[in-house]
Image: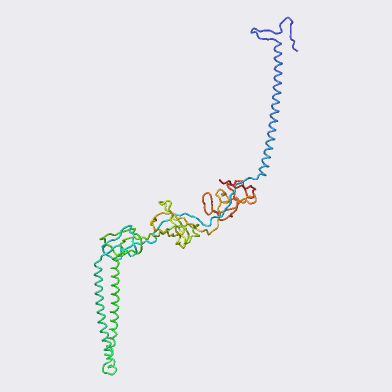
Amino acid sequence: MTEIDVRPDQALQELDASGEANGPFLRTKERRNRRSGAAKFGSAALLVLVGALALGGWRHYQADRELAATSEQARTLVPQVRVATVRASDSRINVTLPATTAAFEAANIFARTSGYIEKRYVDIGDRVKAGALLAEIVAPELDHQIAQAQATLAQTQGTLQQTQASRELAEVTNARDSGLVKQGWLTAQQGDNDRLTLRAQQAAEAVAKSNIAAQQAQIKVLEQDKAYQRVVAPFDGVITQRNVDNGGLVQAGSTFMFTLMHANVIRTQVFVPQDEAFGVQPGVEAVIRVPELPGRTFPGKVTRIASALQPGSRTLLTEIDVPNADGMLQPGIYCTVDLFIPRKTPSVIVPADAIVFDENGLHVAVVSDGLVHMRKISIARDFGKQVEVHDGVKPGDQVILNPALTLTEGSRVSARRPQTS
């Protein structure tokens, strides 16, 4: 044990050279203060540790409770889904297709006789009536050929008269001599000569008649060629092309002279795809639109259809006749045709947002009695926001819009129709 010498006559503390307190009493007090601070710090640290452990345990307990509550809620939750009603397609298909206009009638007029153009009466753009004179062809040698053929015909007719006279003489001679031969006044040889001479004259008469018929036919050909010197319009129409002029040489059967088109009725040709061809028939209504004539429509009807689809494109050639009394439509222009085709195969319309495509293919989620049923579908046409479906659903079915990936067959949901603005 340490002994402290405290003398009454000495001060309770000493001052060092700098004036600070020093001595055995002060050092003992400092030790006591240090022990007391260390005890307090340890107690505080212990309290902090105990509090932290308690807080951590409480939070863990709370997390377990929240996880259990979330699991229970997820197990019993009935999610709300937006649904739309499947509707039946319209009774007819409205389809727009590109097309080309053509004249109702068109003819390329060629020269039917050789010669020179004496006079041309029409030009491009002229409207003519059936039988109107378009041009005249002059061919002097044709007139000479006709005169020669007529002279030959006259000669053949004179030959026929001579042959007929000889035949009559042979008939008389044979009739007279045949009786004398029977009586023995003439020999049998003479009788045979008379009989065969008559037959020869009869054959010569037949040949002369045939020559006359042939010559008359030849004259008709030449006269028809002469008639072709007048080039006339075969029907009402407009001249769209001219390739001859006055004085030009034309050759029969090879010189292209004019193109004539009947444009009072325009024939529009359109190729209808296979999936829309069923239902196209004469009488189906159509509307023709021309981009260069905005706001103007030309109504018409299907008048002719091909009996078979074209193998290369799987399209049906369809012709539509359009009245064109004012001449606004012209042959050979591009246009679009709106066809209103009666629907032959039933189908339904489904929103595009309801379609799901995954490893199982195309399907939709149908809600029935609060349960989800997956239905496979086949799409006929895609209209953007809507699709046309042939099978898998029926009109009135409720399909889920934008179905979640977690939805499976038999999932329970609560249907809610989307709000419409």
Residue 38 position, x and y percent, is: 70, 20
Front residue of 312 and 111: 111
How many numbered tags mark residues here? 0
Taking the image as shown, residue 401 lies to the left or right of residue 221, namely right
Q: Is residue 310 visible?
A: no
Query: Which residue is most to the front?
Result: 326
Front residue of 222 and 190: 222
Quadrant in the picture for the N terminus: top right
Residue 205 position, x and y percent, is: 28, 81
Residue 21 position, x and y percent, is: 67, 9
Q: Which of the colour schemes (rainbow, by chain, secondary structure, one colour) is used?
A: rainbow
Taking the image as shown, residue 76 lies to the left or right of residue 203, namely right
Front residue of 191 and 370: 370
Which residue is found at the position 32% from the left and 60% from the top? Answer: 258
Query: Which residue is most to the top?
Result: 9
248 is higher (above) or lower (below) than 294: below
Residue 44 position, x and y percent, is: 70, 24
Q: Is residue 385 visible?
A: yes
Quadrant in the picture for the C terminus: top right
Which residue is found at the position 65% from the left and 51% from the top? Answer: 369
